[in-house]
């Protein structure tokens, strides 16, 4: 069974060819705004421009052609409407012309499933931290339930906004990580509310401190505060769910300090820590192909409306029939 997975929820157009056993290719092309954040129309124009080349390159890296495909999977939710639309049209066209089944896939759940596949963890609590999303997800009672989440913006968008105020271009995460290595401690708000986290207050505080403090100190302190918040709620989710595996996913998972803090917390409570390599943490087509195959094998049935894109579908709205 050969599946082609298409990812297009935000800045990345990704295409992967995968079988149940192996990921044969994972090609991506990301829109990079000249300034500011993601401009939805520009991002969708980027995807429309590169889609054919990315598909062809993915097939060629896998050593296959269109006619070898058995299944087309695409991320139909959640994300930016403009960019989701491009992926949906491309996927539907391939499915119709090749006469192969089409599988709509939830992007957040795909981050969890690629993590399970690549790292070999079985039943993790997932700390999913990307640009738009920050959620702590665990499987319970037939659904991937959200045990904690951001009350305002995703951690990555928060980091990118702080970077933008500091004159650092998008994506700000890697530059801030580098600056933080030489920074010292400055007190900032610590914003955990119940199981949830919030970032906008910290962002305002950081913005005000830009006039009076050194950037490297703010970068260091931002990471220490925000990652401690995330690790605190992750630990409580592990305790509440009585699970002993933590999986880190999403673009912010590339951050070494976040990984280190997760690792220490897990070690201290006797849990195991897992993080896939960067290629599978950021938005990618492989995670869509992997979840597409799982859903197909579980015999998930779709209504016509399931094929539509959904900008706001929540992780816990999808019934999980493959576990
Ligand atoms: P999603 O659609 O799941 O919200 P996304 O479109 O934001 O994902 P990702 O590739 O998962 O895309 O994540 C990108 C985010 O990761 C950006 O906000 C970027 O700043 C952040 N990021 C990347 N590397 C690092 C790093 N080393 N430290 C902190 N943040 C990072
Ligand atoms: Fe993502």
Image: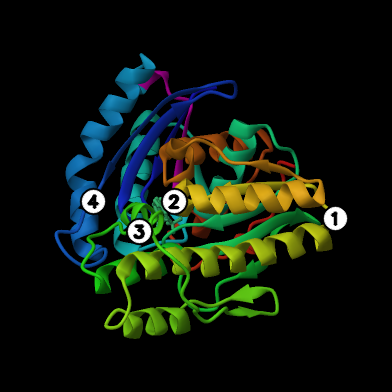
How many marks are shown on the rendered structure? 4
Magenta highlight range: 67-75
Residue labelled with disc 2: 251
The 10 Å Cα crowd at callout 2, few under 14, some 14 to 19, many 20 or more, is many
Mark 1 near mark 3, Cβ–Cβ under 8 Å? Answer: no
Q: Is mark 3 within 8 Å of ligand 1?
A: yes
- Quadrant holding the C terminus: top right
* Identity of the residue furthest to the top in this view: 63
Name the side, left or right, on which 215 lies relative to 232.
Answer: left
Q: Which type of secondary structure does the marked residue at label 2 adopt?
A: helix
Q: Position of residue 257 (x, y in %)?
A: 51, 52
Which residue is located at x 17 percent, y 44 percent?
A: 49
Q: Are marks 4 and 3 in contact (CB under 8 Å)?
A: no
Q: Is residue 193 left or right of residue 181?
A: right
Give the residue at mark 4.
31
Quadrant placement of the N terminus: top right
- How far apart are the alpha carbons under marks 2 and 1? 26 Å
User: Can residue 309 be seen from the camera position used here?
Assistant: yes
Task: State whether residue 164 is above or below residue 247.
Answer: below
Tell me the CA gap for discs 4 and 2: 15 Å
Residue 191, given in percent of the width and then of the height, sits at 58, 79
* Residue labelled 2 has its Cβ within 8 Å of some atom of ligand 1: yes
């Amino acid at each position: 069974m050969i599946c082609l997975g298409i990812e297009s929820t935000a800045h990345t157009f990704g295409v992967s060819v995968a079988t149940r056993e192996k990921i044969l290719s994972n090609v991506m092309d990301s829109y990079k705004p000249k300034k500011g954040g993601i401009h939805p129309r520009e991002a969708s124009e980027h995807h429309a421009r590169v889609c054919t080349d990315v598909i062809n390159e993915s097939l060629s890296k896998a050593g296959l052609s269109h006619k070898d495909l058995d299944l087309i999977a695409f991320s139909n939710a959640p994300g930016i409407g403009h960019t989701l639309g491009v992926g949906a049209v491309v996927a539907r066209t391939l499915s119709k012309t090749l006469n192969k089944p089409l599988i709509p896939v939830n992007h957040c759940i795909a981050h969890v499933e690629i993590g399970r596949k690549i790292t070999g963890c079985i039943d993790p609590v997932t700390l999913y931290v990307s640009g738009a999303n920050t959620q702590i997800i665990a499987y319970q009672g037939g659904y991937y339930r959200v045990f904690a989440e951001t009350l305002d913006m995703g951690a990555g968008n928060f980091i990118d906004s702080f970077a933008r105020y500091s004159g650092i271009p998008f994506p700000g995460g890697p530059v801030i990580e580098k600056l933080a290595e030489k920074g010292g401690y400055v007190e900032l708000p610590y914003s955990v509310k119940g199981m949830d986290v919030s970032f906008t207050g910290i962002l305002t505080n950081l913005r005000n401190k830009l006039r009076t403090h050194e950037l490297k100190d703010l970068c260091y302190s931002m990471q220490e505060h925000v990652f401690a918040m995330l690790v605190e709620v992750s630990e409580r989710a592990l305790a509440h769910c009585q699970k002993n595996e933590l999986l880190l996913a999403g673009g912010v998972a590339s951050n070494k300090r976040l990984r280190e803090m997760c690792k220490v917390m897990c070690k201290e409570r006797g849990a195991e820590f897992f993080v896939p390599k960067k290629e599978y943490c950021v938005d990618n087509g492989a995670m869509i192909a992997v979840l597409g195959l799982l859903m197909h094998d579980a015999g998930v049935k779709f209504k016509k409306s399931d094929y539509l894109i959904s900008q706001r579908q929540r992780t816990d709205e999808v019934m999980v029939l493959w576990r």
